[in-house]
Amino acid sequence: MFSKRQEKLIRSLQNKKFRNEFGLFTIEGMKLLEEALKSSVELNQIYCTESYAERPEFNGLPLEIISEREMGRISNLSTPPGILAIVKIPKPAFKPLDLILYLDGISDPGNMGTIIRTAEGFGVSQFVLSKDCVEIYSPKVVQASMGSIFRTAFIERELKEILNELKGAYHFYAAEMNGENIYEASLKTPAMLIMGSESHGVTAQGRTEEIQQLSIPISEQLESLNVSIANAIILSEFKRRSLL
């Protein structure tokens, strides 16, 4: 029987503080659950309404059937999809891969989710984030990633720290309005690409001499591109040159 204690736990996971405290986050909808089941993430518990109860993919999984009213109380969505799962937050170790995407102060959940999904499409499997980025496991980021969040690793490190750690072994690039044309610049791997915040771009640490600034040629009538779009364009150029 679905208890008040279970409900309290699930509702608390809508808050960043408790996600961090318990090391858990929630996902909703069959699409996200299917993506989670195909990945290596650990499912703590699945809750569903009667309409999902007989699905064969749930055999052997920790499943509890609850009423639509109970689902409405624990759902974070205005229209509950009828299925919610609690997932354990992974704690991956940093790996020196061919391309590392560093996200520097990305604050919009929709942009973050789109960046994660697009980057995975170009072969990026690890992200390093500054502490002022939007939280990866917030419901809006999880939904916007459309499952890519289950197949990619996230490590929180300060930019200066990671630059010092990789210095001499990596090529460093940052997306900047006044940088070198991406289509004319020399691109090499292993590399770390720094994408800055929607409002301010990369921080001062991302504008040092050791970091090559890259820009995307656009119409003079536009001030800038959305960070998720800029990220996709730059990664596509790495891919075009067979660097990814």
Image (tube, helix red, strand yellow):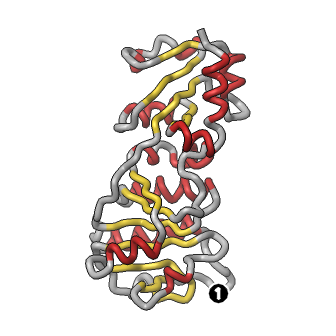
Coordinates of residue 11 in the picture (x, y in percent): 66, 31
Furthest-front residue in this view: 21
Residue position for label 1:
220
Q: Residue at x 28, y 71 (%)?
A: 243
Q: Secondary structure at mark 1?
A: loop
Height in image: 77 above or below 171?
A: above
Give the side of residue 154 with respect to residue 78, left or right: left
User: Eyeballing the image, is 215 above or below 57?
Assistant: below
Picture residue at 55% right of the left edge, 35% below the top: 27
- Vertical comparison of 172 with 45: above or below: below
Judging depth in this view, the residue of 74 and 51 nearest the camera is 74
Where does residue 88 sit, x and y in percent of width and height?
A: 46, 36
| Total count of labels | 1
Tell me if 227 is positioned left or right of 88 in this view. Answer: right
Residue 29, given in percent of the width and then of the height, sits at 56, 31
Based on the displayed image, in which of its 4 quarters is residue 132 positioned?
A: bottom right
The quarter holding residue 133 reads: bottom right
Q: Which quadrant of the rendered structure holds the C terminus?
A: bottom left
Q: Residue at x 44, y 47 (%)?
A: 148
Q: Residue at x 49, y 68 (%)?
A: 231
- Compared with residue 28, is residue 192 higher up or lower down, i.e. above or below? below
The foreground one among 1 and 180 is 1
Q: The N terminus lies in which quarter of the figure?
A: top right
Tag 1: Cα neighbours inside 10 Å, few (<14), some, or many (≥20)? few
Residue 197 percent across, percent down from the top left: 60, 70
Q: Amino acid at mark 1?
A: Glu
Q: Which picture quadrant has residue 114?
A: bottom right
For this orientation, the residue located farthest to the top is: 1
